Amino acid sequence: QLCDEGEALLAKLDGATAAAYRKLFEFAASSLGRGAATATDAAQKAASSEAAATDARHPLKRALQALTQRRALYAACRDACGASRRALCVARLKETLAERGAAGDATKTTDPARFVSDLLAWTHQTLATEADVARGLFGDDGLKALVSAAVEGLAAAVGDRIGAALGRLVDDAAAAHGVACVCGFYADALATKIGRGPLPEALDKASQSAAQTAVDAAQRVGAEARSVDARRDAAPARKALDVAEAIVRADAARPVQSSEAPAATEAAGTVVALALDPVLASYKAQLEAEVARDFA
């Protein structure tokens, strides 16, 4: 009989413990944004929960520490945090760009290439912020996955805005090449920290698109120079030379991981050749024609 009473007491204690952990979970998950009706509500919950990342005595922080004893509930809290932080990142991006006025609008800014550079610098800083918050709330347990989940919502938002900026650089091979370089740089930098998730992949895609924009623009410049007799109109040839020089400058100014001066990229050489080779070919053809006439 005593054994039966002991087992009943243990079962009752287990039930009470489970109920207590469940209440802790409901509090923590709700504080982190679980069950939010809208993305705006989730973002607000995420913002308000940031205080727990730096305050060990914060109720949310203490609840999460207790829930480490219940891994399934703890993991569910981490998932809730990732979803709400994702909504917050997108909301903060929109807010930041709105505060900049025309300079924060890819379709209105006077310097689309600078817009892209500033946008990606902001994105990189946001990732660092998310890493700090995630580490403060959950430690290093699943840190990379949580940060990746938080910033993956930026993939479409950032990618679309870079695409809009590129649409205004179709005739600027040097600026487009610069955008390709900066997108590639940040794609690699982010992938090093969070792996090849949606955001680094979006930047890789943007880099490839910008590189193609540069190639297309340089080809048009070269084709124009080829179609004109430079002795009668040297403007297209001068334009091709100016474009080639601007591409070289843009390539030399690209961001790199090393503090050493970067070596010229193969892509820059390709774009320069597309602009200059037709000019050289045109001059060569003209000289050959003159030699032929003199010989005749």
Image: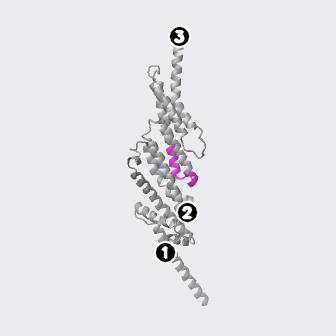
Seen at 53% across and 23% down, the residue is 281
- Residue interval drawn in magenta: 190-208
Q: How many numbered discs, if any?
A: 3
Query: Disc 3 residue type?
Result: Asp
Residue at which label 1 appears: 23
Neighbour tally class for label 1: few under 14, some 14-19, many 20 plus, Cα within 10 Å: few
Residue 276 shows in this picture: yes
Question: Is residue 106 magenta-colored?
Answer: no
Judging from the image, the colouring scheme is one colour
Is residue 195 covered in magenta?
yes
- Which mark's residue is nearer the viewer, 1 or 2? 2
Q: Amino acid at mark 1?
A: Lys
Asked if labels 2 and 1 touch by Cβ distance under 8 angstroms, the answer is: no
Tag shown at residue 135: 2
Identity of the residue drawn at 49% across and 31% down: 242
Residue that mark 3 sits on: 294
Earlier sequence position, callout 1 versus callout 2 = 1
The residue sitting at 54% across, 53% down in the picture is 197
Gap between marks 1 and 3 measured at Cα = 97 Å
